[in-house]
Amino acid sequence: MTKTLLLAAVAATTVVLPGLAQAQRVPAAVIAVVDSNRAARECNACRTAWSNLQSQAQALQTRQQTLDTQLRPEAQSLEAAVRALGNKQPDAALQQRVTAFEQRRQQAAQEIGRGQQNLQSIQANIVQQINARLAPAVNQVMTARGANLVLDTDARLASAPALDVTNDVIAALNTSLPSITVAPLPQQQQQQQAPQGR
């Protein structure tokens, strides 16, 4: 009886195993390659948003240069006055000038700091909007091209140019992302991202 059960088990195994082997086969890889950085720079809305952000960054840099230009003569004048004193203590008028200058310098630094934080928040918002549409665009192109694997160009060592579907992804982004809001992240999202940035 044991021998019969053993033979039956062996026979069942030979019938079931070929089916299991077929079920475990993985389809052949159909690979596409996407330069996600290029797509995020070159879609129509992306170009507009990055250009706008760059203009704002240049305006902040110009403002910083203006503030530096305004503060430099007073800083030089105060430095010369303090040097002229030698080891003597500055009088009340010079102390007031130094205090007033330091306040203006701090205000300028705070203004530039706020401007830089604003630019970082705008950049994060742009990236967030692009990323929200990039994965669906890649999936759309992957399906249309019959691919079952998409690699980013940063993740590959080499590939044939025919595998690159970046232009298709950019076209899909142009359709799904007609515009990008160039504004700081909403306050709640800024607070959520703050711990990550530390």
Image: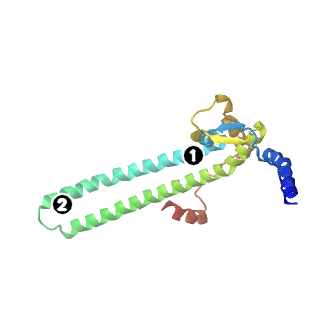
* Disc 2 packing (10 Å; few <14; some 14–19; many ≥20): some
Looking at the image, which residue is at 65% across and 39% down?
A: 34
- Residue shown at 26% from the left, 64% from the top: 98
Task: Using residue 18 as the reference point, say whether residue 160 is left or right of it.
Answer: left
Residue marked by disc 2:
82
Q: Which residue is mark 1?
A: 52
**Above or below, 32 relative to 118:** above
Which one is closest to the eye, mark 1 or mark 2? 1
- Tell me the amino acid under the disc marked 2: Val
- Residue 46, given in percent of the width and then of the height, sits at 62, 44
Residue 25 x, y percent position in the rendering: 76, 44
Left or right: residue 114 compared with residue 13? left
Say which residue appears at 43% left-offset and 51% top-offset.
63
User: Which one is in front, 45 or 143?
Assistant: 143
Residue 68 seen in render? yes
Q: Nearer the viewer, residue 126 or 101?
A: 126
Q: Amino acid at mark 1?
A: Asn
